[in-house]
Image (cartoon, rainbow, N blue to C red):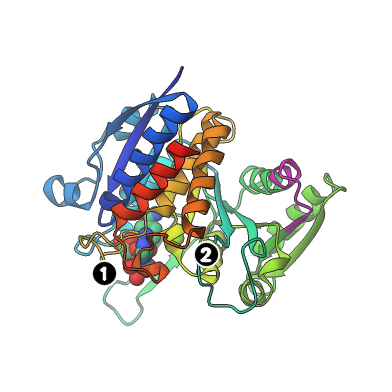
Amino acid sequence: MERFEIAVIPGDGIGNEVMPEALRVLEAAGSRYGVEFAFREFDWSCERYKRTGRMMPEDGIEQLRGHDAILLGAVGYPGVPDHVSLWGLLIPIRREFDQYVNLRPVRLLPGLTPPVRDVSPGDIDFWVVRENSEGEYSMLGGRQGEGTPGEMVMQASVFTRRGTDRILRYAFEFARRNRRSLVTSATKSNGIYHSMPYWDERFRAIAEEYPDLSAEQEHIDILTAKFVLRPRHFDVVVGSNLFGDILSDLGPGVTGTIGVAPSANIDPERRHPSMFEPVHGSAPDIAGRGVANPVGQIWSAAMMLDHLGAPEAGAGVLAAVESVLASTAAPLTPDLGGTARTGDLGGAIAAAVADG
Ligand code: NAI
Ligand code: MG
């Protein structure tokens, strides 16, 4: 039997409520599909920061290194500035392990009530491929003249040839592998003078390597409108760190809730563990009430199974999610219009996996 060592970081807020549901579903998938897991839990979080001054211990990256994958809930909580929690845990993991692809499916699942008209499951089904290692999320820059009328800040974006080419190429390879025909690039080369024209130039160059696929580019402003007006149009959308981040909340928003959206932070070369986490954050507004939707975390676990080389188990989990949400007696959480609790929905999915 295959055995995987998984680092589990529930994090903050609802991360602690949705993680147990994902672990319960993974256990069910393990028994059903013959996969074994050793879960090792880490309490790295804002709470830990308040206690110790660090989100994770100094050797945190080393502690994670030996695992087959990392399953993360969410980090960030009122009382700790968001840039501290993000740069103290999530971003170091993404960068130290060179998880340069952030892959996020956008799919209208059954049982969701999308805020846009005339779409049904099957109509919205595309992928956002987000650059995850450089771009606009950088520590380069500074502040001077603090507190004076001349106060100024500068923040630099970084687009390397290596970083740009590898994410664009991944998007085309991913499209080909998944039999998708269209790759859309998010740009803003009309307003941003250096980096985005460069991004466009590399996109055209890489697109030439894939004559079997269609390529198009859209400025980020009109692209956001098209996500709402023509969500059926897209197959694979590739964007920089910032644009990909925005698009991958907007996409699930168009399907009705971000509570179901998963993401994978991948090192495609498999030199390091990859990390799987829901798109949503710690949701302090509902944390502690037991009403968070666990599907984003569970679907992230399904993506982890795919990555680990257990695609049958991954597909089984996703099929269970879809069948539970489609059933008339589905225990829906409040974000889906129901009154069920986190554990009701998670339990129903785990049971469906076991029966699958
Ligand atoms: P958020 O995703 O936590 O919440 C946005 C809205 O969506 C809230 O109204 C929340 O109740 C709702 N929501 C989110 N997940 C849900 C779920 N599973 N079920 C039902 N409703 C759900 O984003 P927000 O409010 O901007 O950030 C809160 C904290 O989370 C901040 O500290 C932020 O930095 C952090 N954050 C962390 C992320 C991560 O760990 N990857 C990603 C985004 C935000
Ligand atoms: Mg985000």
Q: Looking at the image, can residue 75 be seen?
A: no
Q: Is mark 1 within 8 Å of ligand 1?
A: yes
Image quadrant of residue 217?
A: bottom right
Image height of 39 relative to 231, above or below: above
In the rendered view, does 51 fall on the left or right side of 225?
A: left
Image location (x, y in percent) of residue 50: 14, 52
Residue occupied by mark 1: 285
What residue appears at the point 54 percent right and 30 percent down from the top-left corner?
Answer: 310
In the image shown, does 64 or 257 lie closer to the viewer?
257
In the image shown, does 187 or 150 lie closer to the viewer?
187
Q: Amino acid at mark 2?
A: Pro
Marks 1 and 2, the one that precedes in the sequence: 2
Q: Is mark 2 within 8 Å of ligand 1?
A: no
Whether pointer 1 and pointer 2 mark residues with C-beta atoms closer than 8 Å, the reply is: no
Q: Quadrant of ligand 1?
A: bottom left
Disc ID at residue 199: none
Q: Amino acid at mark 1?
A: Asp
Residue range highlighted in magenta: 172-183
What residue appears at the point 31 percent right and 68 percent down from the top-left corner?
Answer: 339
Verify whether residue 119 appears in magenta. no
Image location (x, y in percent) of residue 123: 67, 65
Q: SS at mark 2?
A: helix
Work out which residue is located at the far top of the displayed protein and give it.
Answer: 1
What residue appears at the point 21 percent right and 63 percent down from the top-left corner?
Answer: 289
How many badges with numbers are in the image?
2
**How far is mark 1 from mark 2, CA to CA?**
19 Å
Residue occupied by mark 2: 252
Image height of 217 relative to 298, above or below: below
